[in-house]
Amino acid sequence: MVDSSVLPSYIAVILLFLAPPGPDMAYMLAVGLEGGRLSALRAILGIGTGMSVYAAAAVAGMGEIARSHPSVLNAVRMMGAAYLLWLAYSTLRSARRAISGHGDIATGRWYLRGVLVSLTNPKIILFYLAVLPQFIGNAENPELQMIILGAINVLMEIVLYGGIGVLSGSFHARLTHSMKATSVLNYAACAVYVVLAAAISIEILLA
């Protein structure tokens, strides 16, 4: 019913796509620094949820809208850049509260943030549109084949990027007792958000 012979090459392609830093990877790094390991775990589950939505949309054929109206993707990307700037602002406020002695850093709605970051990253659906059809192989049920391929992609990103978030969260756990160190971690997370938003905006302008 499905063609499993394509899986080794498909997994290799996923690793090539996940290796370069992107919005999801940068977000997980920032979340780990800002909120710690538990926050990173919640955030990666949110990212996985957003990816699953895109995977379902691709399987349902909604990707044709993205092909016919590329301006829609640019609009989504701009919303993503704006959301990242908002995250940078809220993180900056947390850093200032730490410096002033108010160490109660709000954990934030990490799961929901992860969902929004993932949904405003149209590169995910572009991956499904460009890559998944190449690995249908000899499957008798193409829809089921795409569902399986999409699930593998989601699982791999959760494991790899979740690991990055948890690893960066270890720095937060070691330094959380220090107000100054906590503020430095939040400033670092803020910088990641700003750089990422700027990179997305520049890419849109150059497109």
Image (cartoon, grey):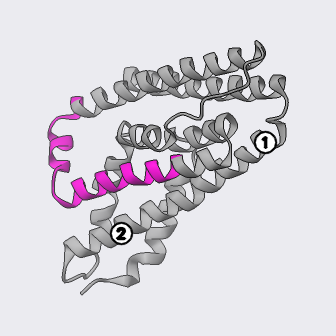
Residue 46 in the image: state x and y as whole percent.
Answer: 44, 48
Q: Residue flagged by tag 1: what amino acid is it?
A: Phe
63 drawn magenta: yes
Examine the structure image and report whether residue 198 is included in the region drawn in magenta: no
Residues under numbered marks 2 and 1 in contact, where contact means CB atoms less than 8 Å apart: no
Q: Which mark is residue 120?
A: none
Left or right: 90, with 74 as reference point: right
Instruction: Residue 25 in the image: state x and y as whole percent.
Output: 56, 44
Question: Could you tell me which secondary element the residue under label 1 belongs to?
Answer: helix
Q: Which residues are magenta?
A: 43-71
Residue at the farthest bottom position: 1
Circle 2: residue type? Leu
> What residue did someone put label 1 on?
171
Disc 2/disc 1 C-alpha distance (Å): 34 Å
In the rendered structure, find residue 149 and report the number of the disc placed on it.
2
Decide: is 113 above or below 60: above
- Residue at point 46% right, 72% down? 9
Q: Quadrant of residue 79?
A: top left
Residue 29 horizontal/vertical position (percent): 64, 41
Q: What residue is drawn where x is 67% and y is 48%?
A: 37
Which residue does the image show at 32% across and 48% down from the upper left? 126
